[in-house]
Amino acid sequence: MSKPPEEQPVDELPEALKGRRQLGPKETFCFACNPDVPCFTDCCRDINIMLTPVDVLRMARKVGLTTGEFLDTHTLLPITKELHLPVVMLKMGADDEKRCPFVTDKGCGIYESRPWSCRMYPVASAMPPARAGVQPETLHFLSEDDFCKGRTFDTEWTVERWRADQNIDEQEELEAGFRGLVSHPWFIGGRALNAKQMEAFFTACYDLDNFRRFVLESSFTSRFVMADSLVEKLKTDDEELLRFAYRWMRFALFGEPTMQTIAEAEGEADGKD
Ligand code: SF4
Ligand code: SF4
């Protein structure tokens, strides 16, 4: 479970993390969560849960929707002037309690595909602002919410042990790829994406089914050097498509040489003749 906001580069700590205990790698915290806790599923309502691209993909597949349908049905896209990247939040139900649409009497109805921040709770995290020449490292904090009785149990954890218990590492490579985008040095100094770049970022990272159409059903493959085996993989392999989306963003937004146009490649070949 989680409270907002998570894993994003910040100029300073988000309001929700201020005053919380920071957890170093060796520091321990006590926590337990199971169907016998008196607060079971109390946390699954009226909360802000920020979704990563991996979350959107996994949740959409779990409930049998396209990424576009999932985004339309289950997410909110808060827009504020301060945002330098699109933010995707899980939409709570319209009932009085504002319950998560996936909560059931038996717990989370999409448990294996629940969002990253639901897995990590009570550990919250934030990325320090991008700085020239410094590899940003994620900072961890402990959420100590009154409604959550999990912290009254004496089972001890470190962040690392908690991550392992919650199977965080199974999606770490793809999450790290996304963190690499949002904490990219391009943003140093407060640079922000324009509306067109925001839209491209949103489609490539979050609306993967739409991005797949963009890559495979437009002139994309005739403009960029792409191995036939990669094109074939992108037709069905969601994770490979997400990796490719990150690669595309690094080229299209940040000007990194992660892609090559066919025109450039032919020019290089001519130069060698
Ligand atoms: S212990 Fe905390 S995380 Fe677990 S069900 Fe209760 S409120 Fe939610
Ligand atoms: S996705 Fe699952 S764990 Fe997260 S708030 Fe909804 S029901 Fe709770």
Image (cartoon, rainbow, N blue to C red):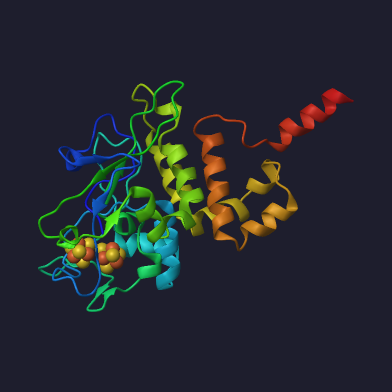
- Above or below, 166 against 84 in this view is below
Farthest bottom residue? 105
On the rendered structure, is 230 left or right of 109? right
Establish if 211 lies above or below 45.
above
Question: Where residue 260 appears, x then y in whole percent?
Answer: 67, 35
Q: Residue at x 29, y 43 (%)?
A: 27
Left or right: 71, with 101 as reference point? right
Residue plotted at (61% across, 36% down)? 258
Name the outermost residue toward the right: 273
Residue 69 falls in image quadrant: bottom left
| Vertical side of 149 occupied by 215: above or below | above
Q: Is residue 72 visible?
A: yes
Give the quadrant of the N terminus.
bottom left
Which residue is at 59% across, 51% downward? 215
**Rendered-image quadrant of the C terminus:** top right
- Give 164 or 242, whichever is nearer the viewer: 164
Count how many numbered circles sit on residues in the image.
0
Q: Is residue 45 visible?
A: no
- Position of residue 32 measured from the top left corner of the image (x, y, whole percent): 24, 63
Q: Position of residue 76 (x, y in %)?
A: 27, 55
Question: Eyeballing the image, is 195 above or below 76?
Answer: above
How far across and how far down the image is residue 135, in percent?
Answer: 45, 29
Q: Nearer the viewer, residue 107 or 220?
A: 107
Foreground of the two, 20 or 202: 20
Whereabouts is ligand 2, in terms of quadrant? bottom left
